[in-house]
Amino acid sequence: DIQMTQSPSSLSASVGDRVTITCQASQDISNYLNWYQQKPGKAPKLLIYDASNLETGVPSRFSGSGSGTDFTFTISSLQPEDIATYYCQQYDNLHTFGQGTKLEIK
Amino acid sequence: QVQLQESGPGLVKPSETLSLTCTVSGGSISSYYWSWIRQPAGKGLEWIGRIYTSGSTNYNPSLKSRVTMSVDTSKNQFSLKLSSVTAADTAVYYCARDYSSSWYPWGLFDYWGQGTLVTVSS
């Protein structure tokens, strides 16, 4: 099974800050990685697919990079509406999610 | 716009079988994979398994012995059965479209239901 290690588990930042979340796969997954945003009481929402492609309608302050085992998700300028939990998800073999990163405003 | 809606009992007794149905509207269920994903309160997401409209399935190895999925294309519905449940199976259960490209059999979740809470308790 492919394990996804996401860090940090929680993060506090100020509006306007650059925020970075990392996700590490237990084996090479090429670029088979997606990122989701989940707000309280809601279903997750796809933000980034294939490691670096922005889903239609998602603001350009969100971005993703990486390949192989190491991936990064970035919010270039944190906005109040970005408060949520973020998950990475691999699809190289079956589906596995990272543990999530809870993002809070400082 | 594709919409998904989970339905089923919100309370299941220990050792019994959890049964949920997801109804797809706004588009055809055909020619896609459809997944079930769950989330215990305050915890992360766990993929349970998926079914193709042909009936072909893939399950999470950790749950495989207890999971059965089925699909009814005439009703635009797919279903989940999880047997021998315990309190550890208490979670919000989501159904989602499991979209894969023509060149790779796995992909992303682009449409989700709102989720339904299932509590396992006597």
Image (cartoon, coloured by chain):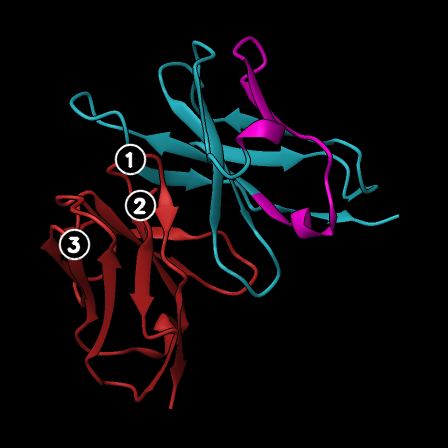
Disc 1 residue type (three-letter): Asn
How far apart, in angstroms, are the residues tagged by discs 3 and 1?
Answer: 14 Å
**Which residues, given as a range, are shown in magenta?**
B64-93
Residue nearest the observer in this picture, B30 or B80: B80
- Residue A102 image offset from top left, x and y in percent: 41, 73
At label 2, the amino acid type is Ile
Q: In this figure, which residue is indicated by the disc labeled 2?
A: A2
Q: Earlier in the sequence, mark 3 or mark 2?
A: 2
**Element carrying mark 1:** loop
Is residue B81 within the magenta segment? Answer: yes
Tell me, yes or no, whether the two marked residues, 2 and 1, touch with CB atoms within 8 Å: yes
From where the camera sits, is residue A56 visible?
no
Q: Is residue A75 visible?
A: yes
For numbered disc 2, what is the local secondary structure?
loop
Q: Quadrant of residue B34?
A: top left
Which chain is rendered red in the image? A
- Is residue B13 rendered magenta in the image? no
Q: Which residue is mark 3?
A: A69
**Residue sitting at x 39%, y 73%:** A9
